[in-house]
Amino acid sequence: MLPHPLMPAPAGRAIEVQGEISRDAAALRFVVAGPVPLIPAKAMSQRADDLWKTTCFELFIAPLGEPGYVEFNFSPSTRWAAYAFDAYRGGMRRWPLAASPQIEPIENGIRVTVDVSHLPPPPWQIGLSAVIEERDGTKSYWALGHAPGAPDFHNRDCFIATLAAPTRP
């Protein structure tokens, strides 16, 4: 991922995402390199709001050609959030999940698996992002791509990965 150009990251900081996203699940590993960031204390794995206010990793999925999308937030604390939007930042509501995401803190990030089978079928536009809070309180904003201006992970310019529609045999 790339740091937002207006909010530079500390020297040596890098974020890498590994894993895969399929029609049924996203299994991702977010790896943070460089200085140890502020990590929220481990907590009971449950839905929580405002996770983006400190170190947090995010997944956005939008059906191609549709204005709506779903946002998932994953905290190293193991708390999580899922929201649906009807359009850009509009019509926000909690997105129901059949099962809580599995979030495993690892030494340099998190491993997460979340069921996405309840979403409309691909093709999808996908955004991956992270907010990293440093121990001094400064934050850097990371994404696969950034829109011009202030950090805004909801902007479709950040949804640069795709999952194609399944091919028919």
Image (cartoon, rainbow, N blue to C red):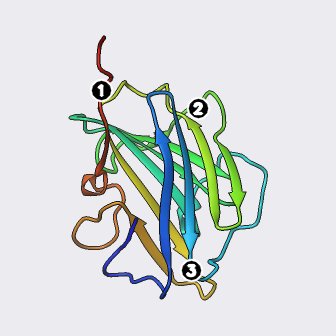
The amino acid type of the residue labelled 1 equals Ala
Q: Nearer the viewer, residue 76 or 48?
A: 76
Say which label, 1 or 2, has the lower sequence index.
2
Height in image: 73 above or below 3?
above
The residue pinned by badge 2 equals 97
Residue 78 in sight: no
Between the C-alphas of marks 1 and 3, the distance is 37 Å
Between the C-alphas of marks 3 and 2, the distance is 34 Å
In the rendered image, the quadrant that contains the N terminus is: bottom left
Residue 13 in sight: yes
Q: Residue at x 33, y 46 (%)?
A: 90
Which of label 3 and label 2 is nearer to you?
Answer: 3
Q: Position of residue 164 (x, y in %)?
A: 29, 32
Which of label 1 and label 2 is nearer to you?
Answer: 1
The residue pinned by badge 1 equals 165
Q: Residue at x 65, y 76 (%)?
A: 38
The amino acid type of the residue labelled 3 equals Gly
Q: How many marks?
A: 3
Between the C-alphas of marks 1 and 2, the distance is 22 Å
Tell me, yes or no, whether the two marked residues, 3 and 2, touch with CB atoms within 8 Å.
Answer: no
155 sits left or right of 93 in the view: left
Say which label, 3 or 2, has the lower sequence index.
3
Tell me, yes or no, whether the two marked residues, 1 and 3, touch with CB atoms within 8 Å.
Answer: no
Q: Position of residue 11 (x, y in %)?
A: 48, 88
Say which label, 1 or 3, has the lower sequence index.
3
The amino acid type of the residue labelled 2 equals Leu
The residue pinned by badge 3 equals 34
